[in-house]
């Protein structure tokens, strides 16, 4: 839940209003989520490649085709990534706490 709150706060940052920089080339930092306008795919910057937010192989993108995604699309992509993470990595039963023995209702 904490990751979700951070993702939403980052997407709603007033210093990055939607649509202002979406039409200009963007030089992203490693780990930033960007839009590749040539493929209409969103990915996370890893070195000189973009790693898809969902399943798939990383791809090389032309730096002139990299844009900041619009706020709504960024939130949807991050939510989809969190949902995928939850489905593919369910919580371990060892991490789920059970009530202590002997303290049941009685």
Image (cartoon, helix red, strand yellow):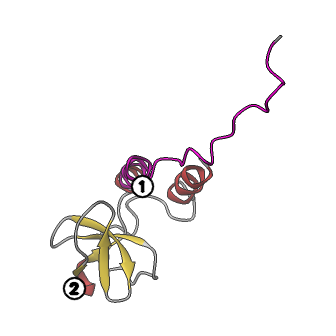
Say which mark, if any, is on residue 62.
Answer: 2
Q: Which secondary structure, mark 1?
A: helix
| Residue 47 position in % (x across, y down) | 38, 88
| Magenta segment includes 86 | yes
Q: Residue furthest top?
A: 106
Q: Which of the two residues, 88 or 3, is positioned nearer the viewer here?
A: 88
Specify the segment rendered in magenta. 77-105
Residue occupying the point 53% across, 51% down: 8
Would you name the residue on which mark 1 appears? Answer: 78
Badge 1 crowding class, 10 Å Cα cut-off, few under 14, some 14 to 19, many 20 or more, is some
**For residue 56, above or below residue 24:** above
**For residue 100, above or below residue 74:** above
State left or right for residue 13 relative to residue 101.
left
Residue occupying the point 21% across, 85% down: 62
Residue 13 lies in what quarter of the image?
Answer: bottom right
| Magenta segment includes 81 | yes
Badge 2 crowding class, 10 Å Cα cut-off, few under 14, some 14 to 19, many 20 or more, is few
State left or right for residue 9 relative to residue 103.
left
Quarter that holds the C terminus: top right
Q: Which of the two residues, 17 or 5, is positioned nearer the viewer here?
A: 5
Which circle, 1 or 2, is nearer the viewer?
Answer: 1
Q: Residue furthest bottom?
A: 48
| Residue 33 position in % (x across, y down) | 40, 69
**For residue 40, above or below residue 85:** below
Q: Residue furthest left?
A: 38
Residue occupying the point 15% across, 73% down: 38
Residue occupying the point 46% across, 47% down: 90
| Residue 10 position in % (x across, y down) | 55, 60
Residue 46 lies in what quarter of the image?
Answer: bottom left
| Residue 68 position in % (x across, y down) | 37, 69
The answer to which of marks 1 and 2 sits earlier in the sequence is 2
């Amino acid at each position: 839940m904490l990751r979700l709150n951070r993702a939403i706060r980052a997407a709603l940052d007033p210093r990055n209003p939607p649509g202002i920089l979406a039409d200009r080339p963007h030089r992203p930092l490693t780990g930033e989520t960007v839009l590749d306008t040539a493929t209409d795919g969103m990915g996370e910057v890893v070195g000189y490649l973009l790693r898809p937010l969902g399943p798939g192989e990383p791809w090389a993108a032309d730096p002139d085709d990299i844009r900041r995604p619009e706020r709504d699309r960024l939130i949807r992509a991050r939510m989809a990534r969190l949902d995928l993470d939850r489905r593919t990595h369910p919580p371990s039963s060892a991490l789920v706490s059970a009530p202590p023995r002997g303290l049941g209702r009685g």
